[in-house]
Image: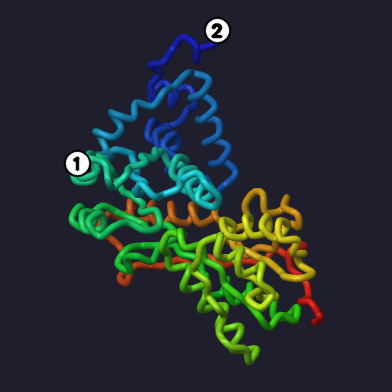
Amino acid sequence: MNTSATNSKVTIYEIAQKAGVSSSTVARVLRGDSKETWKSTARRAERIRKLAKDMGYRANWRARAFSEKRTWTIGLLNTEATLFFEGVHTEFVNGFNDTLSNRGYHLLLLKVESEQFEDVVMGSRLDGCAMFEFLPEHARALLRESQLPAVLLNSDADPTLERIVVDDVDGGYQAAQHLIELGHRRLDFYVNIDAQAHYSIEDRRRGIDAALREAGLPNVRCLHVSHEEMVARLANPAERPTGLICYSHHEAIPILSAAQTLNLRVPEEMSVMGFNDVYPCDKLSPPLTTISYDARRLGKVGAQLLLRQLQAPGVVSQPAHAYTLKHHLTLRASTGSPPSN
């Protein structure tokens, strides 16, 4: 008989009896707190999990939350402008969620503009939270008042909080160095005027300028303009750089399309590169050279920083720890030597 189809009230005591271990051991394994360093303990834990599945065990998370004074819920705070499921954001949200779910937590997406925001944060309905990039001051003030364990994902907005950021100065440096090594001397940095304010814009520009200074070249021309204005500049040979560094794929992908419309050959007449190696960067014509980071790892490390606080409530390193990820360069056909004339 398939017990999983007929019995939904199996207890950890029954699993313990079947496995020949204590109920506390079963409880630790099923909530993900067991140490499985040795092969023997790993095999035992796997056997317990298999027994629980075969016997149709279903965890009573409400009882668990009540007994442990936890909700087993983590809030992922965001604003109306946040794009959760786009580009690199999808990857680090998935990495964050996967790491937490493996430890028994579930994720609540919570907009700071919602009427429920203050009630959820202040009403003991979360064990901790993560802030997604930038949050307005009133939301951060409420979090400080709540004293909830918190972590910043891809943000340096509050140096008092644990956070994981990306070394965008180095990313900008790598981008410019690549073009300089190819022989480029006229570089532009294009940021669409609608790009959301973020520390990475200024950091990438600083990195580009650092590489240019090393090469004895003037600072980059930073163009914070609309797509239409940028295309108009590219149509004018006097305005056109030999190498264009785009702030993100949002800028780079439309620029490659516009270059085709202008009959502007890439990379023969102008090299183009961008940040964030997401679909369809490798499928474009030509495929796009990119600077990118491991976005899924960003989410995983952010979750680990939060879990560390949850395991030791009230203990946060001072100053708060900042974990930094590095960019890497992916070479493709959109960059090459500058035109000879």
Please state the horizontal and vertical placement of residue 125, each as a whole percent of the image.
24, 39
Viewed as shown, does residue 37 lie left or right of 177? Answer: left
Indicate left or right for 170 with 280 as reference: left
Image quadrant for the N terminus? top right
Q: Please tell me whether mark 2 sits on a helix, a strand or a loop.
A: loop
Q: Residues within 10 Å of mark 1 (few under 14, many from 20)?
A: few
| Disc 2 residue type (three-letter) | Met
Location of mark 1 (residue): 119
Residue 1, labelled with which disc? Answer: 2
Instruction: Give me the C-alpha separation between circle 1 and circle 2.
Output: 47 Å
Instruction: Judge whether residue 178 can be spotted in this image.
Output: no
Q: Where does residue 141 sit, x and y in percent of width and height?
A: 21, 58
**In percent of the image, x 54 and y 52: which residue is there?**
88
Q: Quadrant of residue 34?
A: top left
In the rendered image, residue 115, in percent from the top left (x then y), is placed at: 22, 40
| Quadrant in the rendering for residue 294 | bottom right
Residue contact at pointers 1 and 2, CB within 8 angstroms: no
Mark positioned earlier in the residue sequence (1 or 2): 2
Residue visible at 52% across and 70% down in the picture: 168
Q: Hey, which residue is sitting farthest bottom in the picture?
A: 216
Residue 309 in view: yes
